[in-house]
Image (cartoon, helix red, strand yellow):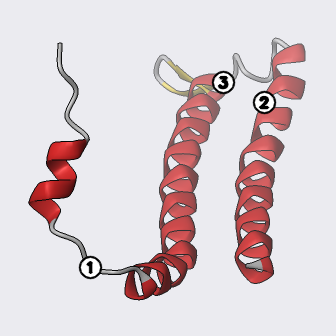
Amino acid sequence: MDRLRETAHSAQRTFLVMNAVPFSVGIVLSCFTDVPAATVSGNLTLGMVWGILQCALFVASAWLYEMRSTRSSDPVELSLESDAPHTDVSGAAAAHRTRW
């Protein structure tokens, strides 16, 4: 259980650092109006490119965090399922129905 906890904390730290560093750089860059306003191509500015890359990084890191968390917790879930007694699924589903 301690190994699972450490793996989860490691994944959380990685996710945080991966997104906090570019976010902090973006905040610092936004203090200087000349830097984000620099034209990259046509109407595309450095600030817009930085924002797009930061959003892409967030989506990618969230996906990687989810994959890492799922991979690290699957062996624990499988071991819990193998130790649990087998029950009738249809009877268990009927017990959880709510009546409106």
Look at label 1 and name its amino acid: His
Q: Where residue 61 appears, x then y in whole percent? A: 58, 54
Q: Which residue is mark 1?
A: 86
Q: Is residue 34 left or right of residue 53?
A: right
Image mark for residue 34: none
Q: Residue at x 40, y 80 (%)?
A: 84
Q: CA distance from mark 3 to mark 2?
A: 8 Å
Local packing at callout 1 (Cα closer than 10 Å; few below 14, some 14-19, many 20+) is few
Q: Is residue 7 left or right of residue 39?
A: right
Q: Of label 1 and label 3, which has the lower sequence position?
A: 3
Look at label 2 and name its amino acid: Gly
Front-lying residue, 13 or 29: 13
Name above or below for residue 78 compared with residue 96. Answer: below
Q: Residue at x 48, y 17 (%)?
A: 43
Front-lying residue, 100 or 68: 100
Q: Which residue is mark 2?
A: 26
Name above or below for residue 100 compared with residue 45. Answer: above
Q: Where residue 80 appears, x then y in whole percent? A: 48, 79
Q: Of label 3 and label 2, which has the lower sequence position?
A: 2
Local packing at callout 2 (Cα closer than 10 Å; few below 14, some 14-19, many 20+) is some
Q: CA distance from mark 1 to mark 3?
A: 57 Å
Image mark for residue 47: 3
Look at label 3 and name its amino acid: Gly
Name above or below for residue 2 compared with residue 44. Answer: below
Mark 1 or 3, which is nearer the eye?
A: 1
Mark 2 or 1, which is nearer the eye?
A: 1
**Quadrant in which residue 36 is drawn:** top right
Q: Of label 2 and label 1, which has the lower sequence position?
A: 2
